[in-house]
Amino acid sequence: MSAAIVERAQALIPRILNPNMIFSLADHINFAITRLTHYKSAQLPFSYDVEQLYPQETDVGYYAVRLINRRLNIQLPVSEVTAIAMHFVNSQTNDLATNSSVNSDDEMIKIITKIIEQEYELRINQTEFTYNRFVMHLRYYIKRMKKHEQISENDNSKLFNTMRHDEPEIYLVAKRIADYVDSQLDTNSNDDELFYLMIYVKRIVNKINTQA
């Protein structure tokens, strides 16, 4: 099954995949089945951010889940689409190394992560789903800013002002992140972009505080 899924991925994804992908994907499928059998409550959430940013990898994820369910007569949750999609995203190491745009975005994300760690004097666990959702948001945010296509939702203005008043530290960190991105891209992030940055920063900080 893993070989069939990788073959499908090679047809859909126009980038170089890690040659060990078949084996690592087989391990993932085995663990997904184990989790379904023994830990039914331990399900990963489905990510619409991943679906937006990586449509080809998400298509492979849907194909993989359908194939596994049909061949093994089981019912993997839809969240496995995201997990398998990210498996293929992370396997594209050879292609990413030669893509200057991706490298540039990755460097910006590393610096943004450091900004949060410095401001709150903490260490972010980069394997946590909360952080990975934040990274997905950052990639989409940077992509929007490069295209000068910012989020514009008038309904957020009241929520933004309330959150800025109630969470001044979160606001200042989000503003520092936005200022850094703007300085790199010669852009000007609006309040809607700031609002969503605040939400994601707050999630990360809350997650770490609850684990402390």
Image: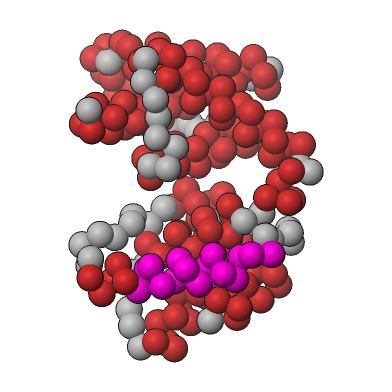
Q: Does the magenta stretch include residue 118?
A: no
Classified by dominant secondary structure, the portion drawn in magenta counts as: helix
Residue 26, position in %: x, y?
A: 50, 72
Q: Does the magenta stretch include residue 23?
A: yes
| Quadrant (top left/top right/bottom left/bottom right) for the C terminus | top left
User: What residue sits 60% from the left and 78% below the top?
Assistant: 3
Quarter where residue 149 is shown: top right
Is residue 6 shown above or below 193? below
94 sits to left or right of 4? right
83 sits to left or right of 204? right
Pick the front one: 203 or 97? 97
User: What residue sits 59% from the left and 54% below the top?
Assistant: 89
Residue 107, position in %: x, y?
A: 64, 28
Residue 9, position in %: x, y?
A: 64, 69
Is residue 103 shown above or below 34? above
Image: magenta residue range: 19-33
Quarter where residue 16 is shown: bottom right
